[in-house]
Image (cartoon, helix red, strand yellow):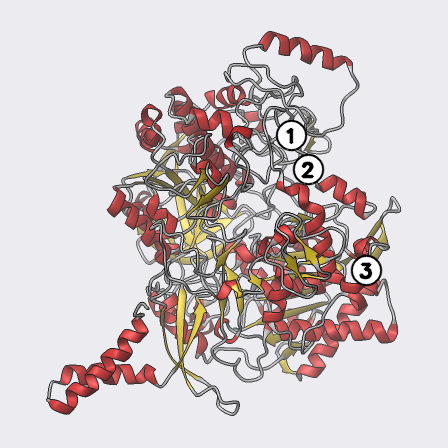
Amino acid sequence: METTRRDFFKIAAVGGAAATVFGFDLKPAYAQLKELKIARATETRSTCPYCAVGCGVLIYTLGDRAKNVTPQVIHVEGDPDHPTNRGTLCPKGSSLEQDMLNSRRLIKPQVRRPGGTDWEDISWDDALNEIARWTKKTRDENFVEKDAAGQTVNRCEGISFIGGCTDTNEFNYLVVKAMRSLGLVYLENQARV
Amino acid sequence: MTNGWIDIKNTDMMLVMGGNPAENHPCGFKWAMEAKRNRNAKLISVDPRFTRTSATADLFCQIRAGTDIAFLGGLIRYAIENSRIARDYLINYTNAAFIVKDGFKLPEDGLYSGFDSAAGTYDKSTWNYEQGGDMSGKAAEAAAHANAAHANPPAPPLLPTNVAYDLTLEHPRCVFQLLRRQYSRYTPETVERITGIPKDQLLKAYEMFTSVRKDGEMKKAATIIYAVGWTQHTFGTQIIRTAAMIQLLLGNMGRAGGGVNALRGHSNIQGATDMAGLYDSLPGYLKTPLPTDTDLATYLKRVTPTASKPNQWDSFNYYSNTPKFFVSLLKSLYGDAATKQNNFAYDYLPKVDRDYSWTHIWDDMYHGKVKGMMAFGMNGVMIGPDTNKNIEALKRADWLVVGEIYPDETSEFWRAPGISADEQKNIRTTVYRLPCAGFAEKDGSMTNSARWVTWKHAAVPPPGDARLDQDILAQIFLRVRDLYRREGGRFPDPILDVTWAYADASHPSLSQVAMEINGKALADLTDPATGQVIKAGQQLPGFAWLKDDGTTSCGNWIYSGSWTEAGPQIQRRGTEDPSGLGIYPNWSWSWPANRRVLYNRASCDPVGKPWDPDRKQVWWNEGTGKWVGNDVPDFKADSHPKDHMGPFIMLPEGVGRLFAPIGVLADGPFPEHYEPIESPIKNPLHPDQSNNPLVKKFKTPYDKFGTPEEYSIVCTTYRLTEQYHYWTKNNPMNVQLIPEPFVEIPVELADEKGIRGSEMIKVTSARGTYIAKAFVTKRLKPMIIDGKKVYQIGLPIHQGFRGIQEDEGKDARTPANLLTPAVSDPNAHTPESKGFLVKVEKA
């Protein structure tokens, strides 16, 4: 079997530990310290969400995957095994850790009421119920069963769904299932523009 | 991409145009550098701006934005005039020899035959091949045949089954001769007038690119690489078609180091296109039904092509399997409710007979037709075009749901700069802003531009009360379904019947969804050829197993094979590359059928031997009677070369289309140069038909267009390495690297206007004013366009009115797309964000 880069680090770390017992060469010790930071971490393989090269990234988190532990991101780097990017990342990919640990993230549902000049907090339940109600009302008021020529069209022209560039294939497929079943025709995506 | 990122290392020649991969796809661009280093490949960069891609180029040509078809048309002319074409490839693998109907007219006056000026559309009946078989060397007979045909009533607009052809390529109406005539007008002198590229530089570029076919040599391969610099025009599709035609003429399609390669801008817009997050398609590029497709059989008859080729040739015509793909999709969507008796619930699908694309959403919302919108990870205000119109449209909507990870401009349209608190009180739109999950918090697959479908794993949970996007979608949908179940309403059937049988319906597992997309057997299936049996309930090994009788389900036929009984192929991590061609057959999975280079049959000569024995992709094995290779053959595995099956198996012709017949494109069988909607000059080819005649303008007060007298400067938008669209402006590191917006302007223009570097300037189009610092540069030089001095400026699009710097009031908070016009390509419906007119003043 081929030795992967990860295995190499593990071997190097073990070797390094042995060396410090018998001498005072600090180099392996530093190497070991650096290794220990990710040695305790969980490595998760992901894909950079930015451009379409699709660079492999490794996300290192602390936490042992137990149900009551929330993993913490401690390091992100390019995946050296990935044939396309081979461990490299661009200035955007290199800042991904800040995208995950970002104080500007939205963390609660909000609503802006008609005529409102600011956001109000709303519970998930209320938000989802209100959105469902809007969806049904708008669909029922704007649904067209037949066109002027009497042909079946079964479409809802009152609602639009627009999807983003980082939505997964599976999410996009669920969008098609849900939105086409509602009769949506104004269905568009970043892929257009 | 027809090829892939790593495959670029196999090339001998790169034309990079309408894209800037060194800055916008840096980790993929390394493969272009590998080709330069290891193969001594040449790189030609054609761009309005001297970019970092240009800095690595062997030749740079500064082009006026929006004149790419003129440049490429001139390249076609040069290749033909200098015999730098792949003749065997052309005759056998393209429709060059096919004879076009009498009555077809080239656009010398800017219009093809059949233009209906009242409707603004074409009657395409003459854009077709002639019926009639082998006409090689029989031009006179063909003329008589055509005259006789005139006496008959007009045939329905279908492709003929036995296409007339002339293998000598000399028939005056054969595609090759029409192509030669079409581009004979694109002389270096004319192309210089249009593009602003001096004649000697043009000839240098043409000579360099076509040098791969010097003296008819076929070993070398050239690639063409592009991005949104080509798509964002009112003729974007036709620019890309010109590139495809060049690659067919030079025999570069299907070959390692060749192809037409769309870089694509984002991590999963390839997948979004595949999954049909677009109004005019269904998953796997199946067409949306029209109202006139009154039942399933009528629809399938319209969309399932019949082979159209010379009788002596063979055509796989793979889309003849469309009914299997479509019925399996309906089974996947509607499960047990889709039965043979009810046409597999065909009526559940909404019928689409007009343009519902991006710019129409905003125009129809402006006019009160679209009353509600859900936007998930899509910042429509920033993307524009014509940001102010989109904001005005949202003011008129009843409700808006935004799913985002950061506060964005779309969710805060009601307090955009310039809207006072008093005015906000008059905006009646209810806006819900739902906190979604970031990329690291979601699993699922994304498809890169090389068509590699790769799974990612979730590393952390969403922060605070944020939820996974798929959960939010499911929870909205299930609540709507519940309302219909309890209260009834208009046509509830599809809502009640759509399958949603995930283990936890309000928290759908994306693995389960991925398996559904791959497809499964609904009854025991047996392959009559091999006797292989797939049991009911098992995952399908690939799309060859799909049936049109309701015994298979498949959410997207091109993804069939991605998650089989052998497990998730999209999670594979095999790092071996036995051929050394960068195929990596065991790393993730690429559609279709794990093929890495599309049309790879064309990498071999007609008898099945690779054009270049050093880069063997696939080949015919006479011993086993099969196509084999390092890549998965994109071909019928047992089709003997002597049967002359065309390598472009998805087309009814089986061969590549230099001429696009009826039903392919809205605006012409060959690309023609049209000026951008706003242009500094009249089209030198036909001043009376300057623009694409099919482009329609909206009629709101926001849809204003500038004249060159008032707005003389050509403006193009672009992206920076350090920022990602409207997202990283929330990231401290990226904001440190690019702290504020700027406008790149030529030194000469700055001198003329008395503007110094880093002074604030106003860029004004007919639609709005953008304010940012001047970045005075030599990377954009003044150009001479049709005898007139023309300046071009460029502006990055990243900053808006919400972001780290924006919130601190450190910039003018003006989105770049408030300048761009809401006009779009009649084929792909992409708006024209490149090459519009502005004026520049000190702020």
| Residue indicated by mark 1 | B308
Q: Chain of mark 3?
A: A
User: Label 1 near label 2: C-beta < 8 Å?
Assistant: yes
Label 2 belongs to which residue? Answer: B305
Residue B808 seen anywhere in this rendered image of the structure: no
CA neighbours of label 1 inside 10 A, class few (<14), some (14 to 19), many (20+): many
Spot occupied by residue B597 in the image (x, y as percentages of width and height): 46, 46
Residue B650, horizontal then vertical, whole percent:
59, 40
Q: Name which residue lies at 44% across and 54% down.
A: B762
Q: Amino acid at mark 1?
A: Ser
Q: Quadrant of residue B823?
A: top right
Identify the element where label 3 is drawn: helix
Residue at 54% x, 45% y is: B832
Label 2, residues with CA under 10 Å away: few <14, some 14-19, many ≥20: many
Left or right: A144, with B624 as reference point: right
Disc 3 marks which residue?
Answer: A142
Q: Residue at x 65, y 42 (%)?
A: B319
Query: CA separation, marks 3 and 1?
Result: 42 Å
In-front residue for pair B623/B367 = B623
Residue B545: x %, y % from top left: 65, 53
Q: Secondary structure at mark 1?
A: loop
Residue located 46% across and 50% down the image: B596
Residue depth check, mark 3 versus mark 1: number of the one nearer the observer: 1
User: Is B815 located above or below residue B485 in the figure?
Assistant: above
- Closer mark to the observer between disc 2 and disc 3: 2
Q: Amino acid at mark 2?
A: Pro
